[in-house]
Image (cartoon, coloured by chain):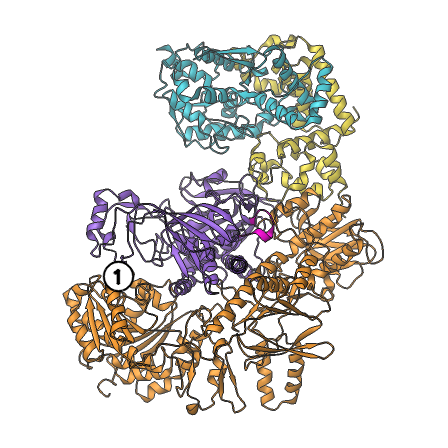
């Protein structure tokens, strides 16, 4: 079906991660109409899958809770999950956007009681655990999921499993007949807060992510450290489930590399410094973290955090891009390379290797309108043509490899850029 | 399948009574089975090999490779140049790319060629035999003429360096190329995919000048093949083959090891699989005899 | 006194791919990737730094570049896409041609013999090359080495992979004259370009 | 307005009906809760259930609604009744999902549900629907302090969004630091060449903009009022003073370079040793030609020393000068090295760094410099001597040797020092001393006020609170514009060290927050984090004892004092945390929907078993931001905890008034546990000090307890993170066990 909602006075925000939520809320709290479109079944994006933030070591869900409360109390934002942008036409102040809404197979009647999940036995890879764990095919994405509504995985629709879920729901919220919908909306401005994705670590062949069980990505490591994660917060080796105490962090895994991502992903240094403290948290003085780096990019006040970690006796730093990883008989990763500060060769054995994988624009993969201006790595710089004609903007990690704090800053700025468009449109319409 | 024709660049080691003559013999047999016509580039010359750098410098190396291109261009127009030797392929391909990339270099090269009344107009297509097999035939295609299975033999696929880097085979990774394993499996052998020295350099360039250094490499390569449970090593490179096979006795002597690992060319395996005799496959050219393979050949 | 760019400029002008030396960001992947890494007095990445630092004698007098076996591991891993193998070859060649490379460096000697061997007939003569190498340090040691290696030689002979007749010539080009002309011309051009005195 | 009509709606869905006796709950709501309308529904949150409620509001003139169903965090869209006061009794996450299954627990489960219904009704009885601040502040003009890149960008963006803007710049011309620059680093692909600063174009737009008014050679002599109604006195150098009224303020007062003279060890102060600003000056003078030194000699060799007087402790621990990294300096030195290389590629340009910090696309700028022949080396510079032939001594960290290099010019990459005005802690000390009569302090204050940027007339001081190293930054990662002075937003290098790109981006964000502030003020709405909250603090001054705790403890400096030292509430500055309410010893401060009574009455409403029942009652006051969600999530994961606890969410532990504790103990509670956010340097409290204050206040009620003859363990305070959904359960169960050890409270039965 095709429904037409909103007017050219409204702002479309694409992506419901921290940047998208921020852009939407900041604009709405200025009194503007906003449509917030998120591809997955829940808001929160990648930040919801992090254990702690640097440098405060606080929890992403804390900010998420506040933003969700702002959202629940604000009628100016219309949230659409499982929604993707198919096409954008028109110009600044007057865009027509075609949205695809995928079926959730669960209606707004869902109370979040979880009866459907208990009823089904089929399992799928948990999309919120980077494949480290399974979940029932009828599931609530995570504890902070918003909307707090279950999702039926398409794989069990039309199977007895699906029927089980339907039968289990006392409030008749499971609707297996749900179909994909196309919605057309008119908006004045579009904010692309489509975020980022981790670079495919398997492509970094010398590190053998695809060959060695105990070589994992920094995002998987976040899940291991998270009490809500697959190991209940214990840092265990994927190969044998033994606790990992001696952990290597490899910086620039895919970043600053002509063979992979040309740009520096900015966050990885701080992320690894943060993660060395996960090791301390779980192993105390018995833990050992080694950071292999080219340059430690702990900019501005974040330098304090670097200093703190530098002074942590369980953490050591080696100025070296690791050349390759091999595996010994006990599946321990062995790192080979050269410490370039004075040329010292090493072959060091660790329990676990964490690749600080680079940030790639999530938009590499989704089709952006042709008139978007991208840099050499695919991050959104704005629109082609004169600044006066700009009606679409990048925000957060879609615009540059940014940490959460800078993403929010960027999203707040994007909100005003969009508001300026709306303001101009409103005036021209009055005239 | 229609007959495929290529301009063949055997290289110095793949000549009669040269260190890789068995490569040449088996390649010819293999191509016959695949209905491939190889025509030697008339009066081809040495590629200079990477070791030529020290005295040869830059332009002379490109010039002598360009001479081969020019020969192929005039005498075998339109045919891809196919090399079996890693060094030849690399040397030629490198020159090709540098010449394509630099008008200046091309100019100077032709200035040199002119001294022999030759000219290279560019655009030679230099390929390794393995590329031809995988890209022009594909594993299924290679299976077609198969008459015997190599069942029961465990192979360590030793790719070596120069066939693998910097160009490599399309779709394969530098760190863990799998095409030799896939070939072995295609012909019914058992591929030891866990073999961890498959892209280690054999130190060929230092084989003569610094034998101890290169022999350390060879020891790792052979040892790890034994560790992986291999009965034979298979390789696409004549220098790897020669070094890894020839020096085993040397290492045994010096270090008291008991190495006796046959090292073969994929072309020898294929010749046998295609029903060729041990002689067709040049198995008589092995220093360390591949008895199990000879047995299959004999069946 | 260091970090004057004279030597860097010299390398950029006269060494194969020398213009890429400045692009190194000192990550060390090349050093860690080299199969003969442990045998290098200076790793490639360090050599690049030394060039920038103006250490002409140390660099051109070093035998490190001769450790390169042309396995190209460094090239495919370098995050800045430096053609490291070629630069090492280029430096070795440059040091060799201006006479600064270490005297008697075995690979330098072998590589030279190899080139001369191949250019003589247009194709490598494995036997003369081998024997030549064995006797490079004089007859006595030559006989020793050759004797030590004879089992191999013998094996090769039996395996028909070595031809004793090659000592009297062996494989060669038909148009050897043309070939020599090409090599000579190319060398002439390169020497002129790089200011080598032949 | 019509009389209040109270209604309770009890949901029997989600299995509540199976495990709880709904009839009993209805009876309780009616008899004890005094609800005039009581209805139960099998599926209250569905369209039909919600309709029943809306009908009652429309037709039965219901003014107050108690929803006894799921947590207040669930089904908020369904249970949205903006025209009535509403309370939520949490029977699902709070009872059904956390009480052990099985008949053995039926009784305690029912008791718990009964109490929550009692509490919901009791709270509702004391609630009013907040009407929003009657004293609306309608001024929507934006004041921008500072006319540099950040300030101009903020002003232009605000004006382009239709808001009148006033710029105050202390210099005689606009542009700030950017006027000192020859070029800036690139913002967009290909990130290869230095770019024009774009200042001229920006200034032209400002000049031409009808909504922008500029005051040059001016500074703020006084800033009074609140969002939507600030009055500022703008003093010109001449002494003339202009009054402006504005609704919000963007402070973009920028930075100064760290004084090079403080770096003698790096040749600071010697000839031909300059800082980056000094080099820009030479470049401007050269105007694209060969860059010459002060003595006119053409520069043929230049060395850039990174982190000069910065990263004092970083990896390399000198502990001197600036401890932080100024972020932009690496890219700036790269840009400046290009000045030389672009003019003459033969000039030796060496950059000595310890970590080259060019994040994001800066990597391309770095590559570009290398292509131009700029040499980078990782080195620790040990000594610099200036003069005609400069020398830089250093430890070459790659070649691992001590070395030195000659140069015609040495550029020290010094850091950014924020111009954020007065440091408030120092100010507070002085004012205290001044009140004590110290003349010295009085004079110092005069000096300080001159140094102040905003000269706020606020009780808590004249400028924005500084976070660290003098930067007026936010403490929050998710909320970079979270400010402790509502309606005043710092932007650019005054907030955090940054380059022009970040500064202008930051300015746009700050401009939005300023716009948001004026819009909120005009509607009497709270700003973040209680955005949209229409309640605001009401005070009965007749009861006030002028103790000043509210004015001192308000985390946002919202409360001033009049000449009689009575508190003066500035609602538009208030963030509705209730810290003042918690602080007030005489309990004269309240909110319509959140007061000493709304919570106190819930505490008293709990049915208290006698001391022989062996059923202790434990009161938990949980911060609604982190602890309460954690408890909810414990329910979501069906984690069982003791049914003896009664949980009341509070806006912030700072709002907890000690009377609640004593009330609870007096009414027979056996223990009281407070759950708040992390305190200390890395505090999580969204209201800055709430958790801190609660701990402090509770440490003081020991005496009260002993007077009551109670053990100190009966009142505890815990730090809880939102992810602690398993830990809260342990905390609760352990505490219940501990209380059982102590035995029932002796206070039972006395009330």
Closer to us: A426 or A152:
A426
Task: Say whether residue A388 is magenta.
Answer: yes
Give the percent coordinates (x, y) of residue A372.
54, 46
Which chain does orange denote in the image? Answer: D
Task: Please state the horizontal and vertical placement of residue D157, each as a whole percent of the image.
Answer: 58, 61
Query: How busy is the neighbourhood of tag 1: few (under 14 within 10 Å), some, or many (20 plus)?
Result: few
x%, y% of residue C85? Answer: 62, 32
For this rendering, which residue is in front, D373 or D180?
D180
Q: Residue at x 60, y 36 (%)?
A: C39
Which chain does yellow denote in the image? C
Residue C2 in view: no
Question: What subunit carries mark 1?
Answer: D
Quadrant containing the C terminus of chain B is top left
The purple chain is A
Position of the N terminus of chain B by quadrant:
top left
Q: Is residue D482 magenta?
A: no
Q: Give the side of residue D337 with respect to residue A332, left or right.
A: right
- Among the chains pictured, the one given cyan colouring is B
- The answer to whether residue D492 is above or below residue B41 is below
- Provide residue D330's location: percent of width, then percent of height: 65, 54
Which residue has dot 1 on it? Answer: D47
Q: Which residues are magenta?
A: A382-391
């Amino acid at each position: 079906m095709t429904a037409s909602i909103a007017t050219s006075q409204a702002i479309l925000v694409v992506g419901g991660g921290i940047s998208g939520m921020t852009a939407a809320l900041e604009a709405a709290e200025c009194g503007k109409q906003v449509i917030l479109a998120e591809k997955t079944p829940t808001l929160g994006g990648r930040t919801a899958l992090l254990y702690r933030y640097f440098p405060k070591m606080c929890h992403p869900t804390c900010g998420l809770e506040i933003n969700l409360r702002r959202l629940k109390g604000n009628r100016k934002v219309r949230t659409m999950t499982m929604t993707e942008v198919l096409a954008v036409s028109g110009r600044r102040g007057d865009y027509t956007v075609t949205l695809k809404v995928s079926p959730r197979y669960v209606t707004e009647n869902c109370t979040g009681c979880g009866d459907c999940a208990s009823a089904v036995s089929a399992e799928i890879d948990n999309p919120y655990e980077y494949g480290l764990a399974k979940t029932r095919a009828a599931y609530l994405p995570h504890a902070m999921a918003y909307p707090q509504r279950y999702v039926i995985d398409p794989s069990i629709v039309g199977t007895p499993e699906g029927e089980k879920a339907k039968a289990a729901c006392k409030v008749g919220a499971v609707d297996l007949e749900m179909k994909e919908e196309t919605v057309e909306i008119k908006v004045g401005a579009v904010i692309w807060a489509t975020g980022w994705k981790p670079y495919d670590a398997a492509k970094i062949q010398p590190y053998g992510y695809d060959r060695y069980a105990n070589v994992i990505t920094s995002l998987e490591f976040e899940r291991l450290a998270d009490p809500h994660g697959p190991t209940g917060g214990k840092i265990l080796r994927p190969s044998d489930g033994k606790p990992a105490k001696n952990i290597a962090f490899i910086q620039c895994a895919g970043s600053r590399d002509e063979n992979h991502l040309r740009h520096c992903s900015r966050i990885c240094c701080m992320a690894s410094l943060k993660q060395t403290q996960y090791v301390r948290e779980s192993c105390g003085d018995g833990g050992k973290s080694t950071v292999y780096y080219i340059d430690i990019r702990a900019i501005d006040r974040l330098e304090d955090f670097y200093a703190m970690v530098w002074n942590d006796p369980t953490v050591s730093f080696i100025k070296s891009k690791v050349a390759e990883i091999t595996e010994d008989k006990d599946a321990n990763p062995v790192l080979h390379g050269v410490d370039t500060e004075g040329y010292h060769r090493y072959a060091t054995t660790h329990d676990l290797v964490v690749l600080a994988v680079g940030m790639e624009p999530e938009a590499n993969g989704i089709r952006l309108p042709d008139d978007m201006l991208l840099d050499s790595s695919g991050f959104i710089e704005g629109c082609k043509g004169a600044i006066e004609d700009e009606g679409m903007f990048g925000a957060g990690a879609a615009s540059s490899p940014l940490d959460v704090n800078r993403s929010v800053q960027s999203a707040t700025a994007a909100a005003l850029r969009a508001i300026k468009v709306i303001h101009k449109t409103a005036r021209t319409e009055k005239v | 399948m229609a007959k495929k024709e290529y301009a063949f660049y055997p290289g110095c080691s793949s000549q009669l009574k040269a260190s890789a003559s068995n490569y040449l013999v088996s390649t010819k047999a293999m191509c016959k089975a695949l209905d491939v016509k190889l025509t030697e580039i008339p009066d081809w010359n040495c590629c200079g090999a990477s070791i030529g750098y020290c005295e040869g410098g830059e332009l002379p190396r490109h010039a002598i490779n360009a001479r081969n291109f020019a020969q192929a261009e005039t005498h075998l127009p339109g045919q891809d140049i196919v090399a079996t030797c890693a060094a030849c392929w690399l040397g030629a391909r490198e020159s090709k790319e540098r010449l394509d990339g630099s008008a200046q270099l091309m100019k100077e090269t032709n200035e040199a060629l002119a001294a022999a009344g030759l000219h290279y107009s560019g655009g030679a297509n230099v390929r390794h035999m393995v590329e031809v097999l995988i890209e022009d035939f594909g594993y299924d295609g290679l299976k077609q003429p198969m008459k015997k299975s190599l069942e029961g033999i465990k192979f360590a696929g030793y790719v070596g360096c120069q066939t693998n880097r910097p160009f490599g085979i399309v779709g394969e990774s530098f760190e863990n190329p799998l095409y030799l394993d896939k070939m072995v499996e295609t012909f019914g052998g058992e591929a030891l995919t866990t073999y961890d020295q498959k892209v280690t350099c054999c130190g060929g360039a230092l084989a003569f000048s610094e034998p101890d250094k290169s022999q350390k490499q060879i020891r790792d390569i052979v040892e790890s093949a034994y560790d992986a449970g291999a009965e034979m090593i298979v390789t696409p490179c004549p220098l790897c083959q020669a070094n890894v096979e020839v020096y085993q006795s040397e290492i045994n002597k010096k270090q008291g090891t008991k190495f006796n690992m046959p090292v073969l060319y994929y072309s020898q395996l294929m010749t046998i699989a295609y029903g060729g005799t041990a002689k067709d496959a040049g198995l008589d050219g092995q220093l360390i005899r591949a008895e199990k393979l000879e047995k299959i050949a004999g069946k | 006194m260091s970090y004057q760019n004279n030597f860097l400029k010299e390398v950029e002008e006269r060494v194969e791919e020398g213009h890429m030396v400045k692009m190194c960001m000192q990550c060390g992947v090349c050093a860690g990737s080299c199969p003969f890494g442990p045998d290098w007095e200076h790793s490639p990445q360090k050599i690049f730094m030394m060039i920038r630092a103006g250490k002409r004698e140390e660099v051109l007098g070093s035998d490190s570049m001769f450790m390169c076996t042309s396995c190209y591991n460094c090239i495919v891993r370098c995050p800045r896409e430096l053609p490291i193998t070629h630069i090492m070859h280029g430096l070795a060649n440059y040091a060799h041609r201006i006479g600064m490379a270490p005297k008697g460096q075995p690979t330098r000697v072998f590589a030279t013999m190899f080139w001369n061997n191949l250019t003589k007939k247009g194709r490598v003569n494995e036997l003369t090359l081998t024997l030549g190498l064995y006797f490079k340090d004089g007859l006595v040691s030559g006989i020793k080495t050759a004797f030590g290696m004879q089992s191999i030689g013998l094996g090769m002979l039996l395996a028909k992979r070595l031809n004793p007749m090659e000592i009297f010539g062996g494989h060669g080009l038909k148009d050897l004259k043309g070939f020599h002309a090409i090599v000579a011309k190319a060398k002439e051009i390169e020497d002129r370009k790089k200011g080598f005195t032949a | 307005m019509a009389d209040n009509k109270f209604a309770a709606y009890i949901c029997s869905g989600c299995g509540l009906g199976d495990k709880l006796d709904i009839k009993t709950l209805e009876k309780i709501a009616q008899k004890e809760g005094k609800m005039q309308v009581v209805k139960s529904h099998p599926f209250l949150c569905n369209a039909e259930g919600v309709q029943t409620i809306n009908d009652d509001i429309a037709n039965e003139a219901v003014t107050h609604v108690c929803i006894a169903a799921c947590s207040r965090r669930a089904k908020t869209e369904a249970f949205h009744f903006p025209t009535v006061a509403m309370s939520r009794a949490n029977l699902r996450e709070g009872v059904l999902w956390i009480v052990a299954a099985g008949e053995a627990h039926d009784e305690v489960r029912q008791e718990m549900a009964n109490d929550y219904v009692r509490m919901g009704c009791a709270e509702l009885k004391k609630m009013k629907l907040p009407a929003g601040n009657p004293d609306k502040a309608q001024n929507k003009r934006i004041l921008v302090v500072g006319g540099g890149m950040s300030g101009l960008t903020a002003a232009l963006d605000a004006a382009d969004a239709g808001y009148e803007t006033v710029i105050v710049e202390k210099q005689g011309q606009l542009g700030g630091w950017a006027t000192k620059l020859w070029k800036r680093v690139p913002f967009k692909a290909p990130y290869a060449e230095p770019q024009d600063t774009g200042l001229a174009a920006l200034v032209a737009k400002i000049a031409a903009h009808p909504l922008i008014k500029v005051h040059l050679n001016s500074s703020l002599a006084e800033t009074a009022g609140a969002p939507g109604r600030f009055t500022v006195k703008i003093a010109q150098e001449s002494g003339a003073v202009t009054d402006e009224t504005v609704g919000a303020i963007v402070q973009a007062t920028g930075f100064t370079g760290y004084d090079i003279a403080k770096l003698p060890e790096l040749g600071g102060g010697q000839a031909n040793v300059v800082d980056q600003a000094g080099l820009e000056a030479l470049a401007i003078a050269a105007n694209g030609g060969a860059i010459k030194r002060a003595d006119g000699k053409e520069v043929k060799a230049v060395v850039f020393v990174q982190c000069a007087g910065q990263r004092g402790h970083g990896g390399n621990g000198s502990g001197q000068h600036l401890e932080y990294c100024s972020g932009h300096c690496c890219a700036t030195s790269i840009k400046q090295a290009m000045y030389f290389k672009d003019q003459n590629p033969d000039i030796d340009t060496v950059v000595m760094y310890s970590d080259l910090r060019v994040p994001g696309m800066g990597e391309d700028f770095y590559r570009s410099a290398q292509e131009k022949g700029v040499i980078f080396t990782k080195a620790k510079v040990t000594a610099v001597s200036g003069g005609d032939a400069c020398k830089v001594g250093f430890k070459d960290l790659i070649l691992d040797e001590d070395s030195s290099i000659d140069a015609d010019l040495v550029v020290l990459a010094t850091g950014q020092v924020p111009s954020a005005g007065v440091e408030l802690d120092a100010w507070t000390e002085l004012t205290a001393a001044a009140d004590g009569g110290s003349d010295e302090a009085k004079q110092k204050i005069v000096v300080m006020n001159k140094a102040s940027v905003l000269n706020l007339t606020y009780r808590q001081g004249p400028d924005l609170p500084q976070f660290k190293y003098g930067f007026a930054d936010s403490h929050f990662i998710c909320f970079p514009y979270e400010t402790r002075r509502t309606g005043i937003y710092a932007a650019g290098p005054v907030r955090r060290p940054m380059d022009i790109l970040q500064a202008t981006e930051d300015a746009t964000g700050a401009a939005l927050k300023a716009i948001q502030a004026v819009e909120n003020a005009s509607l009497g709405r709270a700003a973040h984090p209680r955005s949209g909250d229409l309640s605001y603090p009401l005070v009965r001054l007749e009861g006030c004892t002028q103790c000043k705790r509210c004015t001192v403890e308000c985390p946002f400096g919202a409360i001033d004092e009049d000449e009689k030292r009575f508190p003066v509430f500035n609602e538009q500055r208030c963030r509705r945390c209730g810290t003042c309410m918690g602080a007030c010893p005489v309990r004269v401060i309240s909110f319509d929907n959140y007061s000493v009574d709304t919570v106190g009455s819930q505490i008293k409403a709990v049915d208290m078993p006698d001391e022989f029942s062996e059923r202790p009652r434990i009161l938990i006051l949980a911060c609604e931001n982190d602890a309460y969600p954690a408890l909810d999530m414990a329910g979501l994961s069906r984690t069982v905890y003791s049914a003896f606890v009664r949980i009341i969410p509070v806006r912030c532990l700072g709002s907890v008034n000690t009377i609640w504790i004593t009330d609870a103990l007096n009414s027979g509670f056996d223990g009281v546990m407070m759950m708040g956010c992390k305190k200390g340097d890395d505090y999580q409290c969204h209201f800055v000090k709430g958790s801190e204050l609660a701990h402090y206040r509770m440490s003081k009620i020991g005496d009260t307890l002993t007077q009551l003859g109670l053990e100190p363990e009966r009142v505890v305070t815990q730090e809880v993170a939102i992810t602690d959904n398993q830990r809260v359960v342990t905390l609760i169960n352990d505490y219940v066990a501990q209380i059982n050890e102590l035995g029932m409270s002796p206070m039972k039965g006395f009330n």
